[in-house]
Amino acid sequence: MASTAPFAKMNGIGNEIIVADMRGRADRVTPAAALALNADGATKFDQIMAIHDARTPGTAFFIDILNSDGTGAQACGNGMRCVVQALAAETGQKAFALETVAGILNAEEHADGLISVDMGKPRFGWQDIPLAEEFRDTRMIELQVGPIDAPELHSPSAVSMGNPHAIFWVDRDVWSYELDRFGPLLENHPIFPERANITIARVTSPETMVIRTWERGAGLTKACGSAACAAVVAAARTRRTGRSVSLVTPGGGSLHVEWRGDDHVILTGAAEWEFSGRFDPSTGVWARDNESVA
Ligand SMILES: N[C@@H](CCC[C@H](N)C(=O)O)C(=O)O
């Protein structure tokens, strides 16, 4: 049995996150451990954010991201806020440069407790998202769900925020769509060779939007930060909104996204600590603090 590592169960406006402290050790959280933690109601999560020692000078830590199905992810905006809150509480420092497989992100905790993460620059090229076939204009790609002459959902925008996203624009209440049924089909559609996060978005004004997301590797979630960023960028690109938008997410929380003039996308929102414990990164066996790991 590997030695145990500390973790914190947290959430980013309802997005269920485990922040695992893997600093000072060479092993990784295994897919088997992720599946075991997700199978337990107390530690059920959408993403694990595993904090490792820095790999690159100028960065504080390397963050490995796992979805609840044990697969890796390149970006997780809500999880990054949880990481920043945990590190700020531990160190008193407010700003961090954190590396992921997708690159280096800067993040900071503000005086009001909200946390902003610079999610980097969006990418729109079909090979960057990636899509399986050439689309010269990814503001609207050919993809639909439902009858050919009366599709339920159609013509999504596609965006990479480091991870792949498709955003379907709807006029009705986002809760009136069977995203639990369409989500898995769309996530695994052959047009997305690396699968995709699937969002339905209803623009309610040039500064406001409501979204629901089926996350790649995690399913329906109460919030998805990178999807919020992808939705705002895609909405601004298609002239549905401006570049500074507040979003309501399924958990009832709100996020703010600004697509700055320098092309960087800034995600701002809250993060919340729930409880702490220790776990075995190879098996997922865990215990709360003050209990012993079996
Ligand atoms: N919840 C996240 C996104 C997590 C990654 C996603 N499921 C993927 O596989 O790309 C967020 O807040 O961004």
Image: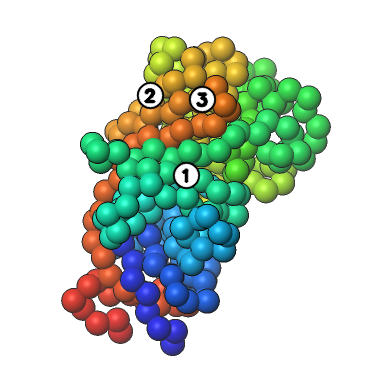
Q: Nearer the viewer, residue 41 or 208?
A: 208
* Disc 1: CA contacts within 10 A as few (<14), some (14-19) or many (>=20): some
Q: Nearer the viewer, residue 103 or 231?
A: 103
Q: Is mark 1 within 8 Å of ligand 1?
A: no
Q: Is residue 8 above or below residue 238?
A: below
Q: Mark 2 falls on what kind of element?
A: strand
Res. 1 image quadrant: bottom left
Q: Is mark 3 within 8 Å of ligand 1?
A: no
Q: Nearer the viewer, residue 75 or 43?
A: 75
Q: CA distance from mark 1 to mark 2?
A: 21 Å
* Image coords of residue 273 (percent x, y): 25, 54
Q: Residue at x 44, y 55 (%)?
A: 47
Residue position for label 2:
246
Q: Residue at x 31, y 62 (%)?
A: 8
Q: Are marks 1 and 2 in contact (CB under 8 Å)?
A: no
Residue position for label 3:
260
Q: CA distance from mark 3 to mark 1?
A: 14 Å
Sequence-first tag of 3 and 2? 2
Res. 207 image quadrant: top left
**Is residue 251 at all visible to an observer of this figure?**
no
Q: CA distance from mark 3 to mark 2?
A: 14 Å
Sequence-first tag of 1 and 2? 1
Q: Mark 3 falls on what kind of element?
A: loop
Number of the label disc, if any, that sits on residue 265: none
- Identified by mark 2, the residue type is Ser
Number of the label disc, if any, that sits on residue 106: 1
Q: Quadrant of the C terminus?
A: bottom left
- Identified by mark 3, the residue type is Arg
Q: Are marks 3 and 2 in contact (CB under 8 Å)?
A: no
Q: Is residue 181 above or below residue 29?
A: above
* Disc 3: CA contacts within 10 A as few (<14), some (14-19) or many (>=20): few
